[in-house]
Image (cartoon, helix red, strand yellow):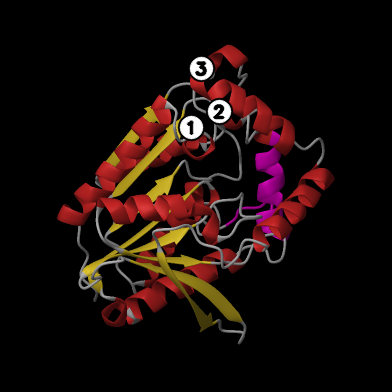
């Protein structure tokens, strides 16, 4: 899908062009090197938090005996009997830390008190699929088991994330449904990274700012490792699912010029066909992650408002009793 400069929302153009110059990679090798370098920069931010958030670290044990770091964000006021939100950060599955998305956590808490658990899941540059999914599921199980101690209503566990975190969200809800150990009340996979095949129009030859077709392909190759190019599990790439029944009510949005546009719209279509309630918005002139890149833009404000209103509605209406 050819994206021209004039197709981009006017408020997003300059910032998109500048960031594209900083982020663009000319080869797969340079992309991988960039992911490693950016992760080193991100790691230096661990433990540093924005004002107005109450955060603590927890460490839980994986099956192999290693430790998974969780960040637990709790309301400054009482957190008795509030929703629990598992938030999975973005970064192409290859980089990022939970601390990078604290503005989202604060918006959620300001909209309605909740406890947010954000796992520092393993990245594809260190361990390919299923490492990130396993870490996310371990964190989900821990949330359920610790619900009373955390002040979480165990019948209102939600999951969300942006980009790769959105893809992980969609995969995790499939995995949790099939395992039957945790019932998820609501999911928020924002502009999710869902389809490794890249067969839809918007994912082909897309050179929009921030995230393009080449970067997307390189990221999928890192995440899937030796499985890339094969018939991978829907727990790796949620767009490969064939059964969408029994998934939780969903809210998502995406920009209309980014690679994930069509796979997000197809995901919404499949959910609705399976009888799953879905709130969805498509934002014109928007590249990947526009709401994070330029949150002050009018279209970003609209998207953030839609997301938070969907979350507020879910708090009042969506529940899933644990079996």
| Residue depicted at x 20% and y 48% | 313
Foreground of the two, 106 or 217: 106
In this rendering, the answer to whether 111 lies above or below 137 is above
Can residue 205 be seen here? The reply is no
**Extreme residue toward the left, this view:** 316
Residue 222 in magenta stretch: yes
Give the Cα distance between marks 3 and 1.
23 Å
Q: Name the residue under label 2.
A: 202
Residue 62 in the image: x percent, y percent? 56, 81
Query: Residue 44: which quarter of the image?
Result: bottom right
Q: Name the residue under label 1.
A: 262
**Could you tell which of marks 3 and 1 lies nearer the N-terminus?**
3
In this rendering, the answer to whether 276 lies above or below 301 is below
Give the prevailing secondary structure in the magenta stretch: helix
From the image, which quarter does the N terminus lie in? top right
Give the Cα distance between marks 1 and 2.
6 Å
In the visual, does 126 lie left or right of 143? Answer: right
Residue 142 in the image: x percent, y percent? 40, 78
| Residue depicted at x 20% and y 71% | 81
- Residue 123 is labelled as none
Q: Are marks 1 and 2 in contact (CB under 8 Å)?
A: yes
Please tell me whether mark 3 sits on a helix, a strand or a loop.
helix
Q: Are marks 3 and 1 in contact (CB under 8 Å)?
A: no
Residue 117 in the image: x percent, y percent? 41, 67
**How packed is label 2: few (under 14 Cα within 10 Å), some, or many (20 or more)?**
many
Task: Tell me the mark number nearer the camera, choosing from 3 and 1.
Answer: 3
- Residue 10 is labelled as 3
- Tell me the magenta residue range: 214-232
């Amino acid at each position: 899908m050819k994206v021209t400069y004039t197709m981009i929302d006017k408020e997003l153009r300059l910032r998109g062009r500048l960031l594209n110059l900083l982020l663009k990679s000319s080869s797969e090798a340079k992309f991988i090197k960039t992911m490693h370098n950016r992760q080193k920069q991100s790691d230096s931010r661990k433990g540093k938090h924005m004002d107005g958030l109450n955060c603590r670290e927890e460490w839980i044990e994986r099956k192999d005996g290693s430790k998974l770091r969780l960040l637990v964000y709790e309301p400054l006021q009482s957190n008795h009997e509030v929703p629990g939100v598992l938030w999975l950060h973005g970064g192409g599955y290859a980089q990022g830390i939970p601390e990078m998305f604290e503005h989202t956590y604060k918006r959620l808490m300001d909209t309605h008190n909740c406890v947010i658990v954000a796992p520092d899941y393993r990245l594809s540059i260190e361990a390919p699929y299923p490492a990130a999914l396993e870490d996310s599921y371990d964190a989900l199980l821990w949330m359920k088991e610790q619900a009373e101690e955390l002040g979480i209503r165990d019948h209102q566990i939600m999951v969300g994330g942006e980009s790769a975190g959105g893809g992980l969200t969609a995969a995790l809800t499939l995995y949790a449904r099939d395992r039957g150990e945790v019932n998820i009340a609501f999911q928020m996979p924002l502009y999710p990274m869902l389809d490794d095949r890249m067969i839809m129009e918007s994912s082909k030859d897309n050179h929009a700012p921030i995230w393009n077709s080449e970067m997307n392909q390189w990221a999928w190759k890192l995440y899937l490792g030796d499985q890339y190019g094969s018939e991978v599990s829907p727990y790796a790439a949620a767009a490969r699912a064939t059964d969408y029944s029994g998934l939780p009510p969903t809210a998502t949005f995406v920009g209309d010029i980014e690679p994930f546009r069509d796979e997000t719209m197809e995901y919404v279509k499949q959910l609705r066909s399976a009888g799953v309630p879905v709130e969805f918005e498509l934002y014109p002139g928007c590249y990947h992650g526009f709401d994070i890149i330029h949150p002050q833009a009018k279209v970003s404000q609209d998207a953030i408002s839609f997301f938070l209103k969907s979350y507020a509605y879910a708090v009042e209406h969506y529940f899933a009793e644990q079996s």
